[in-house]
Image (spheres, rainbow, N blue to C red):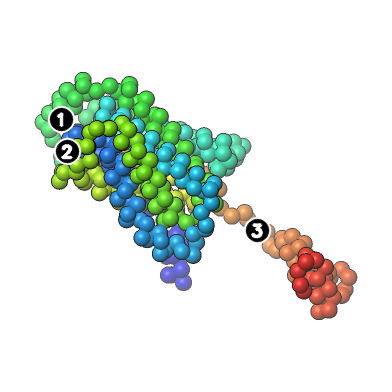
Amino acid sequence: MESSKIEMMYDKAKPFLGVIFLQFGYSGMAIIGKFALNQGMSHYTLVVYRHALAAAVIAPFAFFLDRKVRPPMTISTFIKILLLGLLEPVIDQNLYYMGMKNTTATFTAAMCNILPAITFIMAWICRLEKVNLRKLHSQAKVVGTIATVGGAMFMTLMRGPVLDLPWTSSSHHHQSSSANSTVHDQQNPIKGALMISTGCICWACFFILQAITLKAYPAQLSLSAWICSAGMVEGAILALVMERGNASIWVLKWDATLLAVLYGGIINSGVGYFIQGAVMKERGPVFVTSFNPLCMVIVAIMGSFILSEQMYLGRIIGAIIIVSGLYLVVWGKSKDQSPPKSNGDQRLPDQQPMAVKNNSTGNTSPGFVAVEIAKEMPSNEPI
């Protein structure tokens, strides 16, 4: 009895564990990717290599584990896969890294918090998300989505006073702030913001199209392998066009560039696509993207402990707003998942037992039941 309760609790917790894992993965990639780009790595090469590695890692598992659930490939599904590979692996990620070059990793993470709002609107339009503004749980989802985005923007724009924590170093903070301001002078935040915003729109379209594709092609591992393969090929074509005559971009060194390829390929592209597909199949695209602002909270906490960065009061308030918004979204989604209450045996007439269904006639003999079954079966099927 206790083991069944534990299994039920684990099944309910799996979607939450999955999206939290995704946010930790995104946080790590934001830092590692910035290091790799600062060392001169081409973002076109990074996109190609990480998806080539992801496809190589996932394909063997998909081949064996999806044998029983993998449907035949159709032209419609193949076109959707090509579009999926173009939207997120190629367009979104290249714009993301180009925007990061023109800004900072923190600013990039903050701009990506417009993703939940865009995804929510698109899912609403495509009828992938149930929204009835007369219902309290739908109102909670709308308010929660706005709160998560607003809290992330608050963390970015409203710093407030510095909190003197024992594990932070003021001298290190002033040095890093001076270095960041020098780098900031060489960047173009407006250009970077436009690139990141456009990438987020493509990312939201990717989530919506992935949810639609999973209905016709429910093999999640195989779909992830196909997306990575399509992204590798399409990204390679784009890299050869944009970096033609520059063969040095394909050289990997034993530094942050190799780490970015390994981390991004295995964690973000390989495992990430599979997890978000699995969670999306159960909870929908809005549930997955609503946790995206959590990335800023993780980065702020990790930066405070690992990098000894100062913690501001505005970040604490913004984190509280984000957590409150996430709670509203999760509560609203839980009401969508709740089964309708049953008041006794209210089955439809066609679902009633045959003997009860014909009780008004008083004839419940086996012969009468067989005749009634024969009447209800299609004429072209044998009895």
Secondary element under disc 3, as helix, strand or loop, is loop
Residue bearing mark 3:
342
Mark 1 Cα shell of 10 Å, populated few (<14), some (14-19), many (≥20)? few
| Camera-nearest label, 1 or 3 | 1
Q: Which mark is residue 110?
A: none
What is the C-alpha distance between the residues marked 1 and 3?
61 Å
Instruction: Residue 13: name its quadrant.
Output: bottom left
Secondary element under disc 1, as helix, strand or loop, is helix
Q: Amino acid at mark 2?
A: Ser
Residue 23 percent across, percent down from the top left: 34, 44
- Look at the image and tell me whether residue 67 can be seen: yes
| Camera-nearest label, 3 or 2 | 2
Q: Residue at x 27, y 39 (%)?
A: 45
In the rendered structure, are the residues bearing label 1 and label 3 in contact, judged by CB atoms less than 8 Å apart?
Answer: no
Q: Residue at x 21, y 21 (%)?
A: 186
In the rendered structure, are the residues bearing label 3 and label 2 in contact, judged by CB atoms less than 8 Å apart?
Answer: no
In the rendered structure, are the residues bearing label 1 and label 2 in contact, judged by CB atoms less than 8 Å apart?
Answer: no
Q: Earlier in the sequence, mark 1 or mark 2?
A: 1
Q: Earlier in the sequence, mark 3 or mark 2?
A: 2
Residue with the most extreme front position: 245
Q: Residue at x 35, y 56 (%)?
A: 58
| Camera-nearest label, 1 or 2 | 1
Instruction: Residue 33: name its quadrant.
Output: top left
- Look at the image and tell me whether residue 96 can be seen: no
Residue bearing mark 1:
176
Q: Amino acid at mark 3?
A: Ser
Quarter of the image with the C terminus is bottom right
Residue bearing mark 2:
308
Residue 244 percent across, percent down from the top left: 27, 32
